[in-house]
Image (cartoon, rainbow, N blue to C red):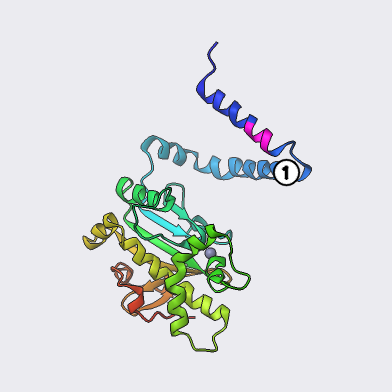
């Protein structure tokens, strides 16, 4: 009797899991039960209410108009902070919301592959790069040489925050604290990541034709506020103060040529 492929794969997966983890301990069992309860809440309430929407998204396929690039930080939840629905956002999350610059020699680049899929296949109309307050990746840029990140894998990733760090150091007063430097670098990094997006030929071409728009956002965790970068004033301003959305739809010049100011309080 032939075993369906899916079941054989599941069986093989289970064997490997058991071999690697041994018997689940009490903590792991409790966590699983907790997840099961939370999933029940989703099923009983959110899914029940939006079931037809999920069915439609399967039948018609997804067509999100927005690619959201955010940090992996557990406190910055893209769908939550802009009240997004299933199908609204295509999301890339990685430490520091860094975007590697275009480089076809790099293998296994998940960010680049997701960018390509979002832009060339899904044809999103806008890309948001969203940084946030108290970002561990940005703070890590300034810990180098002290507690630091000795692991090569982290060092390689943090290089994408290097230009923002250097510009923050160059422009800050000599007595600036580490947290002030990190706050400054957070804003600058958002613009450098937008620049990195423009290093992808398929993105730059669409931006130049105004068929794709780039946005730089900053999420203030403790205030629950989003600010956006206004290229006209070269400042971050509160998103809910944006009267003219055209202001947010301009192509970004290199961040290194700009003096970037934080959001108005
Ligand atoms: Zn972060």
Q: Residue 69: which quarter of the image?
A: bottom left
**45 or 84: nearer the eye?**
84
Q: Position of residue 96 (x, y in %)?
A: 50, 63
- The reply, left or right, for residue 226 in relation to residue 207 is right
Residue 60 screen position, x and y as percent: 36, 37
The quadrant where residue 61 appears: top left
Q: Is residue 100 left or right of residue 143?
A: left
Instruction: Identify the residue position indicated by label 1 in the image.
Output: 28
Residue sitting nearer the eye, 257 or 143: 143
**Residue 240 visible in this rendered orientation of the protein:** no
- Classify mark 1: helix, strand or loop: helix
Q: Which secondary structure is most common in the magenta stretch?
A: helix
Considering the image in quadrants, where does the N terminus appear? Answer: top right
> Residue at left 58%, top 65%?
149
Depth check, front residue: 133 or 188: 188
Q: Position of residue 125 (x, y in %)?
A: 31, 55
- The segment highlighted magenta reads 16-20
For label 1, the crowd category at 10 Å Cα-Cα, with few meaning under 14, some 14 to 19 and many 20 or more, is few
Q: Residue at x 71, y 45 (%)?
A: 31
Can residue 44 be seen in the rendering of this structure? yes
Q: Quadrant of residue 170?
A: bottom left
In this picture, residue 111 sits left or right of residue 154: left
Residue 189 position, x and y percent, is 44, 70
Q: Is residue 19 magenta?
A: yes
Q: Is residue 191 magenta?
A: no
Q: Residue at x 45, y 54 (%)?
A: 92
Residue under the image location 47 percent in, 81 percent down: 169
């Amino acid at each position: 009797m032939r075993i369906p492929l899916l079941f054989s794969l599941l069986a093989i997966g289970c064997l490997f899991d058991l071999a690697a983890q041994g018997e689940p301990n009490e903590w792991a069992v409790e966590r699983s039960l907790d997840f099961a309860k939370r999933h029940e809440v989703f099923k009983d309430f959110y899914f029940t209410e939006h079931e037809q929407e999920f069915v439609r998204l399967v039948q018609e396929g997804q067509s999100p108009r927005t690619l959201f690039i955010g940090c992996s930080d557990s406190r910055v939840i893209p769908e939550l902070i802009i009240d997004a629905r299933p199908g609204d956002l295509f999301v890339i999350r990685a430490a520091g919301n860094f975007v590697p610059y275009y480089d076809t020699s790099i293998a296994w680049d998940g960010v680049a592959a997701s960018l390509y899929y979002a832009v060339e296949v899904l044809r999103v109309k806008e890309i948001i790069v969203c940084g946030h307050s108290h970002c561990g990746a940005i703070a890590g840029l300034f810990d180098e040489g002290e507690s630091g990140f000795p692991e090569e894998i982290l060092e390689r990733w943090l290089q994408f925050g290097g230009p923002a760090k250097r510009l923050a150091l160059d422009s800050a007063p000599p007595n600036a604290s580490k947290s002030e430097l990190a706050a400054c670098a957070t804003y600058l990094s958002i613009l450098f990541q937008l620049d990195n997006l423009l290093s992808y030929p398929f993105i730059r071409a669409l931006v130049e034709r105004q068929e794709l728009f780039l946005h730089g956002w900053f999420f203030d965790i403790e205030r629950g506020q989003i600010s956006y970068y206004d290229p006209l004033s070269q400042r971050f301003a509160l998103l809910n103060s944006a009267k003219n959305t055209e202001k947010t739809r301009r192509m970004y010049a290199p961040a290194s040529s700009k003096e970037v100011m934080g959001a108005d309080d």
